[in-house]
Image: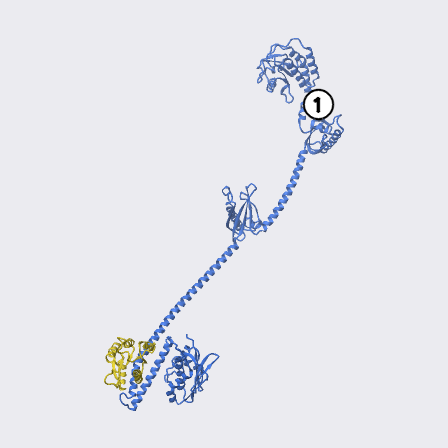
Amino acid sequence: MTNTPEKTKPLVLVVDDYQDAREMYAEYLEFSGFRVAEAKNGQEALDKAFELVPDVILMDLSLPVMDGWEATRRLKGDARTKGIPVVALTGHALKGHSEDANEAGCDAYVTKPCLPDALVDQVKKMIARRDAASTR
Amino acid sequence: MASPAPLPPAEADPGARLVLAEHLLACESAVACARAVVEWLARRHGVPAACVGPGDGAGASACLASEGLTGAQQAALARAWDAQGSPLAGFRNRPGARGLAADAVEGAVMPGGFFAVPLGRAGAPAAALLVVGLPGPAVPEDVAWVASCAGPLLARQLASDARAPRRPEPDRLLRRVINAVSDPVLLTDTDGTLLFANARAEALLVAGPDASPGRTRAVELNQRLFRETLAQGGTSVHRREVSLVDPLEGMDLLFELATTPVLAPDGPSVVVSVLRNLTDLGRATQALGESYRQLRATEREARSERHRLDRVLDSVADPIILTDPAGGMVMMNDPAERLFAWPHEEGAGGEATLRRVRANDALFASFLANLLGPVNAGVSRWKSQLTLDDPATGAPVPMEAMANKVLGDGGELTGIVTVFHDRTEVLERARLLERVKEVSSELEARVQSATAELAEQNELLRQQAIQLEQASAAKSQFLANMSHEFRTPLNAILGYTNMLLQGVSGEMTPPQRRNLTRIDSNGRHLLEVINEILDITRIEAGRMPLHLSDFGIPELIQEVMAEMDPIIARSKLTVETRLDEGLPGVWSDRQKVKQIVLNLLSNALKFTHEGGVHIAAEYQNATGTVAISVKDTGIGIDVSNQEKIFEDFQQVDSSPTRAYGGTGLGLSICRRLAEMLGGRVSLQSAPGQGSTFTLHFPRRARRT
């Protein structure tokens, strides 16, 4: 593991253009014992991901500049970041978004509204799955 | 021949003179005497000679006899003898022979002079003059002798002729004349006794003593017939027929007898009868009669033929007219008469009728003109359409006229037959046909216009459908967008409420916690409404596809029970499940079946205060459907409301102050989902008796 010195606290990158939601998830993740980094759009998410290499990325799909699908595809297409689990977040329940998201390489899919505790559960599940995979 | 001849010998010829004298004595008439003298002189001296004397008839003189003179010379001599003051006339009162110059007689140049010798007794007026073509001056002895000897005889004869009563028998000339008549002529007395008959009459009525007995009998018969016929008519002028027998051949002869009574000047009245042979005429008459009879028979035959033809022609309904080569009417049948003939009965038609007949005749004449005359010799038939007038009513009669020339054996035009054909019916039929065509084309046009209208309306409807679809899609898109916009803030509301309730921001007082709980439950309700609206929108927009898979009903119900467990626990109601053994696995959309059952169970729990909820599942083999029923002991639903509750946003109590929560969209969504599965949701309920909602769906869904 090439994590930061605070090895016990996994880093979660929260990508959402809606500030209230982003900060809410960030606050609850920190409350729940995670380190959090934030990004407002897809390009920022790429920059932060390459820079910080987080343990999990929460990716809202509807984003300005570069949307979540495109950002996910690039993350999964890059050797540095392709191992990072991406949890897709979307309020667009109408479209077949989950399929698109899977196609783009998302590891999990969560429909908004998603209560903070449910989201944290999902993040913990992702980390546990990654740890299980890496220890195998 | 009349050249001057030497004087005859002076000595007399006693023999020749004796012969003449004897002859003269035997003569019964002056003419005979004169002829004997003239012939004797002319023969003895070879010169012309003539004797002029009183003619028979009205006093004019004539040549009684002549030798060697032309007719004109004879006539000139006779005129000169009668003319007062002529040299010849001078001999009338002076006896003695004398010579005269050749030109002494006007108009008759005598050859070389001549002698004139008055005849007659001395002292008596000369009755005759002897003219002899011998030059003077001395009188030849023979001439003198003749004058002296024959003169008195001739004179006496002449006087006797004039004085003596004429005998009934005509003289020879007359007899010859009468004999020359080809018809038998008879002279009889009034009793019929034959006085004179000409040759023809003698052949019929006279038999000589040496005639054959047959002829004698025939003649006697004829005489008797003739007398009887004559007696019938009396003596007046009369014509009648008499049949006699031809004595020679025994044939019957028919004569017309014309009788004329003549009163003789010196005696009893006599009858002149002329018979005209009618035998040939009779035969001709007979032949004529025969011909006439044949003609009559032929005519009768022709007439009956004609009548037959007339009847045939009259029986033809079409008017037929036969015209002569000049265009004159020869014959027409009854139908033609009605159109072209003047009405027979008086008052049968007024002025108008006559006018119409005249107009028809004029039309026909101008029609026929196409065949008449040398210009149209090459035209053998002519067809045309005429519109005649019905003489009685004046109604127009459309006719087709067809005229054909009738040619004789030599190819000459003998007549024209015209047949008319009434076209009224044909025209009427054509008119009806035209009308039918019109109507049918009108109908067709109407159908076409109706079809076009229908197509237009279809197109309009199609466009409206497209517009509706577009509007519906727009609405769905709008609602989808709206739900997203709702969710984003709702996400924050619910999230922060949840965080506060979890004590992320520190512990709260009980009133704070109670209020936050209300915010939380209202937020959840709002989310529920938004989700259900989104479901309906997705179903209506066709954006909720079927995800068919194999699954088992028991597992599904177990899952539902697990999810509803917190609510069941809270409701303090008993929830039982009873599943048929041997429920088959199904092929359907698991998610939708589950959603329906969840919804039905949620409703049952909501509207039931005490008692329990019973879930049952069974397979109906006959229909191949699975039935999952949720039975409660709740408030029940009145029949009148049982349909209403399946409608959007409807509960039995839809008032703002209603006792039960929920969006009123649950059953509406259930029904839609069931329909997507090819099934339905049924309801059995009564107020206070509880309700049973049942989902029926085919065990094997068909992908639509």
Q: Quadrant of residue B673?
A: bottom left
Q: Is residue B531 left or right of residue B52?
A: left
Check the image and report above or below for B5 versus B635.
above
Location of residue A130 in the rendering, given as x and y in whole percent from the top left corner: 30, 82
Give the image's coloring scheme: by chain
Chain represented in yellow:
A
Residue positioned most to the top: B11
Check the image and report above or below for B90 versus B448.
above
Q: What is the crowding at mark 1: few (fewer than 14 residues within 10 Å), some, or many (at least 20)? A: few
Identify the amino acid type marked 1.
Answer: Arg
Q: Is residue A20 left or right of residue B428?
A: left
Residue positioned most to the bottom: B510
Q: Quadrant of residue A64?
A: bottom left
- Does residue B390 appear anywhere in the picture? no
Q: Quadrant of residue B175?
A: top right
Q: Nearer the viewer, residue B171 or A47?
A: A47
- Does residue A60 appear anywhere in the picture? yes
Location of residue B152 in the rendering, given as x and y in whole percent from the top left corner: 68, 14
